[in-house]
Amino acid sequence: MTIKNQIKKSFLVSLWFMFLTFPILVIQVNTVENVIKWRWLNMIGVGIGSFFLSILWRYMLEKRPEKGKQTKKYQLFFLNNILHEKKIFFPVIILLSLFVLCFPYIFSMYQTNIMISALIYVMMGLGLNIVIGLAGLLDLGYVAFFAVGAYSYALLNYHYGLIFWIALPLGGILALIFGVILGYPVLRLRGDYLAIVTLGFGEIIRLVLENWNDFSFGPSGISNIPKPCFLGIDLSLQGTTKYLFYIIVGMVALTIFVTNRLQNSRIGRAWIALKDDEIACQAMGINKGKTKLRAFGLGAMWAGMGGVIFAAKTTFINPASFTIWESVIILCTVVLGGMGSITGVVLGALLLILLPEYLRAFSEFRMIIFGAVLVLMMVFRPGGIIKNVRRIYKFDPILEKNSVKNEVNS
Amino acid sequence: MDFDFLTYLFFGGLTRGSIYALIALGYTMVYGIVELINFAHGEIYMIGAFTGLIISSVLTMLGLPILAIVVLSALTAIIYSCAYGYTMEKIAYKPLRDSNAPRLSALISAIGMSLFLQNYVLLAQTSDFLPFPNFIPDFEFWEPYAHILTSPELVILITTVIVMICLTILIKFTKIGKAMRATSQDKVMAVLMGVNINRVISITFIVGSATAAIGGILIACHIGQINFYMGFTAGIKAFVAAVLGGIGSIPGAVLGSFVLGLTESFFAGYFSSDYEDVFAFLFLVLILIFRPSGILGRAETKKV
Amino acid sequence: MKSILKVKNLTMNFGGLRALHNLNISINKKEIAALIGPNGAGKTTFFNCITGIYKPSNGDILISPKGNNEKINGLKPNIITKKGLARTFQNIRLFTSMTALENIMVGCHCVTKAGVIGAILNNKSTKAEERLIIEKSYFILKELGLEIYVNELVTSLPYGAQKRLEIARALATEPFLLLLDEPAAGLNPQETNELDELILKIREQNDISILLIEHDMKLVMSLSDNIHVVDYGKKIGEGTPKEIRNNPAVIKAYLGEEVV
Ligand SMILES: Nc1ncnc2c1ncn2[C@@H]1O[C@H](COP(=O)(O)OP(=O)(O)OP(=O)(O)O)[C@@H](O)[C@H]1O
Ligand SMILES: [Mg+2]
């Protein structure tokens, strides 16, 4: 396309967007005082912005890799290279673990608290990654299982004085049971119906928590949930924060370990096959329902445990923490990072949760950016920032005896 | 049982159903053609209501007569909703279609669009509820029946019927309607027969958006306030209605909407309005489990 | 001879369309049979019915891999695959986000059994099973001459290799009857010749029966022991290649299409 054409096209786009955003972005009505605020500056901004963005948009669309050819390009991505080179991988892992271990001693308690929240999201993202990234089931009610975990700890503690360490596995198991009970009837549905039904389920749980006062204390929620205690000793506030930090780090490590094992196992391959082609998957002798249920239940379990930790961290929960948008944020971390890729999800979650925390000016725009991220990622980079790279199997051609080398996987 | 209460609930349910129907049409038409649940459809309905409010406030301050205000703001709202629907399709869905992306991607893109539009209105306007002027007067001739069915409700019902008739004519008797039907039956064949698929899809989004905008303005008049979040729940409910009736089927969407509206109304009247939404979702789950193709949908064997 | 698959009066309706009409077909042990017929005759529908993807409207499907008749109509596709019927698809349906080897490893799913716990703990038996899967998959890959693509994503494979990979994947389920839906479609003459040998080799090495749908008459005539001809969902002929070549009903159905 010639430059003249480009400019003409972008000019038209920019006119169109100025028209489109005119009433909502320019006019603001104050219905109480009956005055209208005209914000012409916004219009100019939209005009200029959309002019350049449309050029960028078209350029990016053209540069979009052809289907099937994209893999080579992704493999050049430096992070993957780092992760696949053992010489680099191990030092990086050791440095990273050292950094994580020292984190609460280097940074303030405030930072540590933020990091704990971010790591809860990492854990949930990794759990949802099993459901969406591996098995391809769009679960929009994921937060319901988070709520199940959080409320089981809060309620069991309130009524029976159950301690954190018992509640943690119990919350996971309860969420898993919930997942299986919901999943059993629902997983037979077509993919897109599943999204709506799980979304509905998430809302049902929230509404029940909000309205069933006798059970859940309604909108006012439950407070004074104890933080975990260390060998029966009550720690100082700072001590518990550090302790909680190590707990969540441990849980994240466990999650990474488990999902990594799973994704390269017989079950993991069945999940991916199911995502790629349901009919061919069944023709390989894979039980569709059972395979889906496994993914759904396991995903729910991590959310449940995340919920227990969340309740212990905030010491107060109410239904407002479990809206559908929470599910969407977790979805966003998985999509941004790269569906199916563990490193991707970890990075995606850290990026999405930490950036708005540190860029305060930016946090107002958090949700709108999440929305844009979802759309843009799907349009330009459906594989996420770090695409899942399949495991490489090495065979020795001369000896004809295969020596399977397990490459480090992302 | 009180007969008046019964009729009150009945007409309440019909009104509710009409609004659901106006939104559900968009879902079902888009689904029929591109097999995509357009999550952001509820947002179009919300944008319609907002545009209507903004334009009518401006016109009121300019001192135009009430009739002119109503007509102009309704028209602008419809035009803007259509424009948003059209643009949304071009940005969030068309590139995915061009690259043959899996359905999961399109669905995620749709959720992103919904989140984006909601927060766009939230940031550009307000997170508070805005009062919406009641454009629909209480008709005098309707006075005797007003205790069961208010004038606004009457207008909603009549408008819905008119929209349905127009839509039926559009789909059954016009050239573009024929192209739509062809596309929804067999896309490849339609292309071979010279149907411009992209145009058909754009028009489908535009028509769906227009009906949603009409719904948005009507409900805003009826309830008297709007909020950036209004599209979300309404959108989900309308989707439930569309699935109930058999997604992809236009009469199905209308029927499903009325069934959902009525059952909800009776449920809220006789049991508890706290659990009204819970009930709607449970209803959806049960329908999908026992009759996934909906009331009027056909159970089709997918070609392998 | 012993038949391993008996289809009796199979009928399949799609709304008003009767795609299959009282079809009777029987396949013998170690036989290569062909199912031919003009476009839209109902051949793929027949495959879909016996592999459980469609639920037949009427009729019986019986298998007897070990001499005992067993009815399989109405069973789920995965159960049928477990019982020993494996298939390929007319339009390639590989798992596109996996490598060639992994595609075959998925095929091994129904003959292995490691579960979630096993995968997480990675205990001795799981490790051994996983090793077995890898070895077996690689063996099959080599059998079909695809070993150079081991770790390639399937989308980057040439068309012919993708078609062969589908056969490999089906073989991994250890079937007693392999159903191939147009294996030669889209292949060049040389590839078709290779396919001819490959199919014979597969039968010998795995000791199985093969039923193939094919439009390439040369391939059909040279390979098959027995040919079944359908048209408009009805069977119009059956016999050896020689008999079919001289069958007037078949010639009539194929009028305009070349019968070599
Ligand atoms: N799921 C379905 N729904 C409706 N009609 C179907 C379905 N599957 C197949 N048909 C119809 O059944 C008939 C037989 O189709 P089938 O695919 O079995 O033909 P075929 O013999 O495999 O043809 P080809 O050689 O072109 O592959 C066709 O008219 C087809 O349109
Ligand atoms: Mg066929």
Image (cartoon, coloured by chain):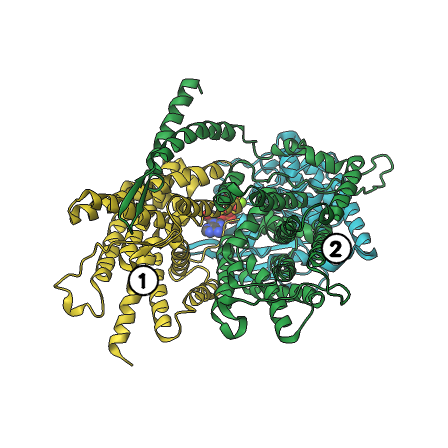
Chain coloured yellow in the rendered structure: B
In what element is the residue under mark 2?
Answer: helix
Across the whole image, how many numbered discs are drawn on residues? 2
Horizontal arrangement in the rendering, residue B112 relative to residue A278 (left or right): left
Residue B208 can be seen in this image: yes
Q: Which circle marks residue C197 in the picture? A: none
Residue placed farthest to the right in the image?
A399
Element carrying mark 1? helix
Q: Is residue B213 above or below residue A84?
A: below
| Residue marked by disc 1 | B16
Task: Name the residue tied to disc 2.
Answer: C119
| Kind of residue at disc 1 | Arg
- The chain drawn green is chain what? A
Front residue (pair C182, B20): B20
Label 1 crowd (10 A; few <14 / some 14-19 / many >=20): many
What subunit carries mark 1? B
Front label number (1 vs 2): 1
Q: Colour of chain C?
A: cyan
Q: Residue at x 36, y 47 (%)?
A: B44
- In this rendering, position of residue A67 left or right of residue A163: left
Q: Quadrant of the N terminus of chain C?
A: bottom right
Residue placed most toward the observer, B210 or A104: A104
Residue at image point 37% right, 71% down: B268
Residue drawn at point x = 50 percent, y = 49 percent: B303
Q: Residue at x 40, y 73 (%)?
A: B272
Marked residue chain, label 2: C
Residue C39 in the image, given as x and y percentages of width and height = 49, 42
Q: In front here: B170 or A194?
A: A194
| Amino acid on which the number 2 mark rests in the picture | Ala
Q: Residues within 10 Å of mark 2 (few under 14, many from 20)?
A: many
Res B132 → quadrant: bottom left
Q: Position of residue C115 (x, y in %)?
A: 72, 58
